[in-house]
Image (cartoon, grey):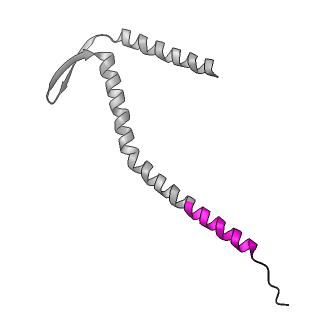
Amino acid sequence: MRIVSLGILLIVLLFGLSFAVLNSDSVIVNYYLGELEIPLSVALILALVLGALLGIFASLGVILRQRTRISLLNRTVAMTEKEVMNLRSLPIKDDH
């Protein structure tokens, strides 16, 4: 398994290296405070990373809300299981 993951990592690194070599032309990136001349591959990777970070921050509220709900449900399940065990340990009374 370790050899397979190492092989996949090597393939991804080779694709990344070939991507960087094929896209080595410089581009001008204009932003509000000025402009910057960087290689196209760097600009694309920065855009990818920035988009991934924005996606993570956008979904962070939903993730935290779901974790809180899961915690509440786990406490409810534990309390219900404890109640069921207590009810099972009570003796049965026969009124006949």
Q: Where is residue 83 shown, x and y percent of the image?
A: 65, 70
**Span colored in magenta:** 75-93
- Quadrant showing the C terminus: bottom right
Residue 25: which quarter of the image? Answer: top left
Q: In this view, does 91 lie to the left or right of 29?
A: right
Please identify the residue farthest to the right as the structure is shown: 96
Q: Does residue 1 lie above or below 89 as drawn?
A: above
> Which secondary structure is most common in the magenta stretch?
helix
For the residue pair 68 and 21, the one nearer the viewer reads as: 68
Measured as percent of width and height from the top left, residue 8 is found at 55, 19
Residue furthest to the left in view is 33
Question: Residue at 31% of width from left, 19% of height from top?
Answer: 42
Residue 54 falls in image quadrant: top left
Q: Residue at x 49, y 18 (%)?
A: 12
| Magenta-drawn stretch contains 90 | yes
Nearer to me, 72 or 37: 72
Task: Indicate left or right for 68 with 80 as reference.
Answer: left
The residue depicted at 74 percent of the width and 72 percent of the height is 88
